[in-house]
Amino acid sequence: MNIIKKILSYPLSIIFYFIYSLILIVFQPIQWLSLKLGGYSAHKKSVDYLSCFLMGSLYALGTRIKFINNQKIPEGVPLIIVSNHQSMHDITGIGCFMRKYHPKYVSKIELGKGIPSISYNLRHGGSVLIDRKNPKQSIPAIMEFGKYLEEYNRSAVIFPEGTRSRNGEPKRFSQNGLKMMVRYAPSSYVIPITINNSWKLLRHGNFPLGIGVKLLFEVHEPIKSDSMPFEELFLKTEKAIKDAVVI
């Protein structure tokens, strides 16, 4: 069975990349027009469709996608979505399933150019691009991002591992980005999310991709950011995420 799956993974990966690339190319001008003609609301809606279309492209690989949310997520307040990180599909998954909450991203500056649709959204959709090697740029940028979340009741998406896990095993969580956002968005709630099996899509690298993967997103109990000291908040968030990771 594994041999058959490996053989099938080659043509299915080609089909997936064709669909994925086509979506990125098509949504680049759609985003531009939406922003120019309809402002933030129209652009946000185009990004919602982009995220969900990109997630849908995974069905070409026989991927099964499940999103579990049994929590009552507060509305009309800033949210800080914190998740483990296993692949690029984590971002579009959260973007699609959490679209109601206007998710924005803490992203490395390199992604701000060169990728159709993705780079445009990161530059114009309210996300923050940081140079992780330059604290003089990254710290003020995250401070301003936190203020933006507080003023407009947006949601931030942050992956405190920094880089993705290649085998599903969570890496050490860094406090810095979350600590800064909690400080400058004091009315926020932290929303821990655990992602399972996303790494299996890339277990052989970028080609061929894994097929028949059961991709799972699970939302945990929201935590009021100012309800406890930051150290306690951070440990509680990290534990909720890591305890639900299945290797």
Image (spheres, grey):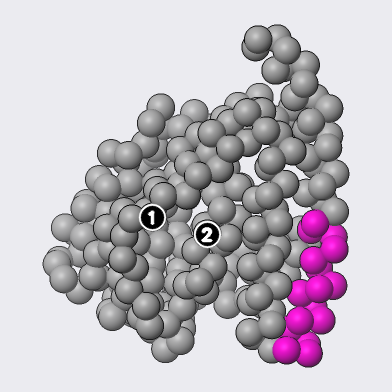
181, 71: nearer the viewer: 71
The reply to whether residue 212 is in sight is: yes
Q: Where's the N terminus, which quadrant?
A: top right
**Residue receiving disc 2:** 97
The crowd level at tag 1 (other Cα within 10 Å; few <14, some 14-19, many 20+) is some
- Give the residues in magenta: 23-38
Q: At label 2, which amino acid type do we have?
A: Phe
CA gap, disc 2 and disc 1: 10 Å
**Residue receiving disc 1:** 69
Seen at 38% across and 55% down, the residue is 69
Q: Per the image, is 72 magenta?
A: no
SS at mark 1 in the image: loop
**The image quarter in which residue 35 lies:** bottom right
Specify the label residue 146 is tagged with.
none
User: Where is residue 168 shown, x and y percent of the image?
Assistant: 46, 32
User: Where is residue 74 shown, x and y percent of the image?
Assistant: 32, 73
The reply to whether residue 199 is in sight is: no
**The image quarter in which residue 23 lies:** bottom right
Seen at 14% across and 67% down, the residue is 228
User: Where is residue 5 shown, x and y percent of the image?
Assistant: 70, 17
Q: Per the image, is 30 magenta?
A: yes
Q: Where's the C terminus, which quadrant?
A: top left
